[in-house]
Image (cartoon, helix red, strand yellow):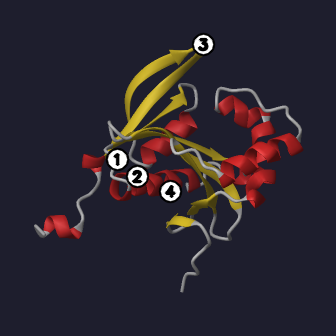
């Protein structure tokens, strides 16, 4: 029997996506300060002190932004291994952008990211009634592209920002497998 986790949004076979908690702040801060992870996100590592970061983090947890939602990724053992978010929510167009970080190095390349992305796609397209989820990943980051392809995303373009080149990928609602009710004509 599976125990319901406080703030649980969706659960798969290996990962659980749940709402952020203040207790996630130390991991998030460490990952946001990591130069390697910042490089994968085409940004710079943060340099603010932890207490300053915690004050901002607390505000985001207590008063979430309606145009973005960040979730914690937990593994089978309940360990916080990363984060997944959707943002740039456009209710008129029915779409949002997805971003993901697997912060624990030993968990990268192990399928956790692809499962988390699949779970969030299904949540957004079925429960939140979005029609499209998209993302940008650095053109040189083949591991991320492979992860997203495993989750069902397909390349839909390329773009540049500053010195960086990005692959644009998307997943559309009509690509979801039909449910049993749809197949039976219900």
Q: Which residue is mark 4?
A: 115
Furthest residue to the left?
185
Q: Which residue is mark 3?
A: 162
Q: Are marks 4 and 3 in contact (CB under 8 Å)?
A: no
Q: Nearer the viewer, residue 106 or 166?
A: 166
In space, the residues marked 4 and 3 are separated at their CA atoms by: 31 Å
Position of residue 182 in the picture relative to residue 142 (left or right): left
Would residue 30 be visible to someone looking at this image? no
Position of residue 33 in the picture relative to residue 121 (left or right): right
Q: Nearer the viewer, residue 19 or 116?
A: 19
- Going from N to C along the chain, the mark reached first, 2 or 4, is 4
Q: Which residue is mark 1?
A: 130
- Going from N to C along the chain, the mark reached first, 4 or 1, is 4
Closer to the observer: label 2 or label 4? 2
- Going from N to C along the chain, the mark reached first, 3 or 1, is 1
Residue at the image point whose x is 56% and y is 51% from the top:
113
Q: Which residue is mark 2?
A: 124
Residue 86: x, y in percent? 51, 44
Residue at the image point whose x is 37% and y is 59% from the top:
127
- Going from N to C along the chain, the mark reached first, 2 or 1, is 2
Position of residue 81 in the picture relative to residue 3 (left or right): right
Residue 108: x, y in percent? 65, 49
Q: Are marks 3 and 1 in contact (CB under 8 Å)?
A: no
From this view, report whether residue 99 is shown above or below residue 5.
above
Position of residue 43 in the picture relative to residue 148 (left or right): right
């Amino acid at each position: 029997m599976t125990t319901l986790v406080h703030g649980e949004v969706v659960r798969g076979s290996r990962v659980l996506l749940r709402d952020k908690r203040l207790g996630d702040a130390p991991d998030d801060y460490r990952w946001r300060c990591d130069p390697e992870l910042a490089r994968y996100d085409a940004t710079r590592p943060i340099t603010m002190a932890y207490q300053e970061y915690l004050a901002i983090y607390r505000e985001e947890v207590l008063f979430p932004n309606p145009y973005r939602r960040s979730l914690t990724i937990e593994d089978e053992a309940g360990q916080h291994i990363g984060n997944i978010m959707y943002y740039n929510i456009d209710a008129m167009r029915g779409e949002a952008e997805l971003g993901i970080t697997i912060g624990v190095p030993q968990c990268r390349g192990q399928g956790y990211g692809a499962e988390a992305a699949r779970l969030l796609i299904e949540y957004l397209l079925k429960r939140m009634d979005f029609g499209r989820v998209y993302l940008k990943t650095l053109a040189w980051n083949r591991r991320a592209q492979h992860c997203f392809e495993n989750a069902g995303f397909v390349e839909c373009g390329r773009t540049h920002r500053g010195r960086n080149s990005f692959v644009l990928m998307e997943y559309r609602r009509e690509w979801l497998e039909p449910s049993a009710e749809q197949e039976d004509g219900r």
